[in-house]
Image (tube, rainbow, N blue to C red):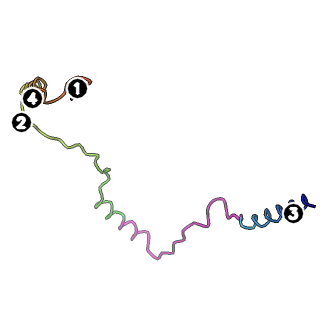
Amino acid sequence: MNKTARFLSLAAVAAFASFGAMADEADGSQFALQFDTNRTRAEVAAEASTVAQTRSQEPAGSRVVTYSSTADRSAVRALAAEAVRTGQIPSGEIGTIM
């Protein structure tokens, strides 16, 4: 009797749970947007051409900023060597340990 009652209760729970598992179409058509418009193709094309002129097609940060320096290469190398000798900047793989 105990096994039969347990089996029937499991069957009832499974039947009850199956009612909530209803599915819609596999392509997700329940989420499809419906558009009802009265604009002509020419109006949409004209708006699209003005928007394309006002927006940049380049991703943000894709341009490289150029900088023209007036410093001499040998002067910069001499200053870097001086900074390494005096310990102002680290040198090598480990650097300065303090």
**Residue 5 lies in quadrant:** bottom right
Which segment is the magenta one?
21-47
Query: N-terminal of the two: label 2 or label 3?
Result: 3
Circle 2 sits in a helix, a strand or a loop, which is it? loop
**Residue denoted by label 1:** 95
Compared with 78, 23 (above or below) is below
Which mark is nearer the camera, 1 or 2? 1
Name the spot of residue 22 as percent of width and height, x first. Answer: 71, 65
Name the spot of residue 17 as percent of width and height, x first. Answer: 75, 64
Which mark is nearer the camera, 1 or 4? 1
Q: Residue at x 6, y 33 (%)?
A: 71
**Residue denoted by label 3:** 8
Compared with 77, 28 (above or below) is below
Give the quarter of the figure containing the C terminus: top left
Circle 3 sits in a helix, a strand or a loop, which is it? helix
Circle 1 sits in a helix, a strand or a loop, which is it? loop
Q: Which mark is residue 34?
A: none
Query: N-terminal of the two: label 4 or label 2?
Result: 2
Name the spot of residue 39 as percent of width and height, x first. Answer: 44, 74
Mark-to-mark CA distance, 3 and 4: 88 Å
Query: N-terminal of the two: label 3 or label 4?
Result: 3
Q: Residue at x 30, y 51 (%)?
A: 60
**Residue denoted by label 2:** 70
Left or right relative to 96: residue 85: left
Mark-to-mark CA distance, 1 and 3: 76 Å
CA neighbours of label 3 inside 10 A, class few (<14), some (14 to 19), many (20+): few
Which mark is nearer the camera, 2 or 3? 3
Mark-to-mark CA distance, 2 and 3: 90 Å
Mark-to-mark CA distance, 1 and 4: 20 Å
> Do callouts 2 and 3 mark residues in contact (Cβ within 8 Å)?
no
Amino acid type indicated by mark 4: Val
Left or right relative to 29: residue 2: right
